[in-house]
Image: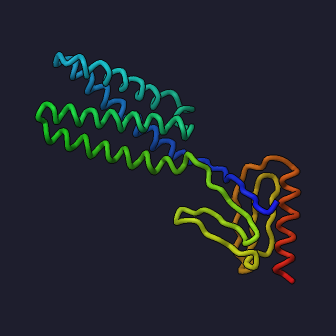
Amino acid sequence: MSNFKFKAKREFSSKQFMQRKGLHIMAGLSFLVTGISFMIGKAMVPGIPYALAGGVILFTGLFRNPVIANHQRNLYFRWLEVILWLGLASISFFWDETRTGVLMLLIAAGFGYVTFVERKYAVAPLIEFDDEGASVPFVSGRQSYPWNSMESVILQNGLLTINFKDNRLLQVEVEVTGAFVIDQFATFTSARLQRVGS
């Protein structure tokens, strides 16, 4: 095999979790209150769906922590929130409430941006090794490292360690699919490092 790809394990902090939870609670409360106010004002058609959606999102934010912790499920709720904000904007414009409509559009844009940023966390980054060297994703972009810049590459117990010749060290937790892959990877990397070392 002349190409190896490893998925980096990605876990988010309790601070990020609380931020997700807070946004869901805020959106859920907003939609629930809006739905109830529509129903009090005798606008049942938009009121009932907004109250129901607000209740589900609020319940999810308060109690269903596994849903929020799962990146893909969290994205579904984010998109639902964006759609509901856009719906409120269109209702506001329909009722000639331009300021409220613009505010709802801005909130929808903010939730859309949050959804776009969180989408990056839904896909685990790939660390790739080929005949040229290693390619590692960072926040600023993908960085390539040629074999002649590396002292050693070790994959052990799900931890990938790259020791560079300039005394830098890169360690990443990765998902590994068996001992056979680890042995093949060790053979591959040692052959490439010996080739550039001689």
Viewport quadrant of the C terminus: bottom right
Q: Is residue 125 left or right of residue 65?
A: right
Q: Please provide percent x and percent y for residue 1.
A: 82, 59
**Residue at (87%, 50%) from the top-left corner?**
179
Q: Nearer the viewer, residue 65 or 158?
A: 158
Q: Is residue 76 above or below residue 142?
A: above
Q: How many numbered marks does the figure carry?
A: 0
Q: In this view, does 115 lie to the left or right of 153?
A: left
Q: Which of 55 and 96 is in front in this view?
A: 96
Q: In this view, does 75 lie to the left or right of 182?
A: left
**Residue at (15%, 42%) from the top-left corner?**
99
Taking the view exactly as shown, the residue that stands out farthest to the front is 1
Q: Please provide percent x and percent y for residue 79.
A: 41, 37
Q: Please provide percent x and percent y for residue 189.
A: 82, 67
**Residue at (46%, 41%) from the top-left corner?**
20
Q: Please provide percent x and percent y for residue 172.
A: 69, 58
Taking the view exactly as shown, the residue that stands out farthest to the left is 96
Q: In this view, does 190 lie above or below 66?
A: below
**Residue at (70%, 61%) from the top-left corner?**
128
Q: Is residue 195 above or below residue 138?
A: below
Q: Which of 29 and 156 is in front in this view?
A: 156
Image coloring type: rainbow
Q: Is residue 104 left or right of residue 77?
A: left
Quadrant of the image occupied by residue 56? top left
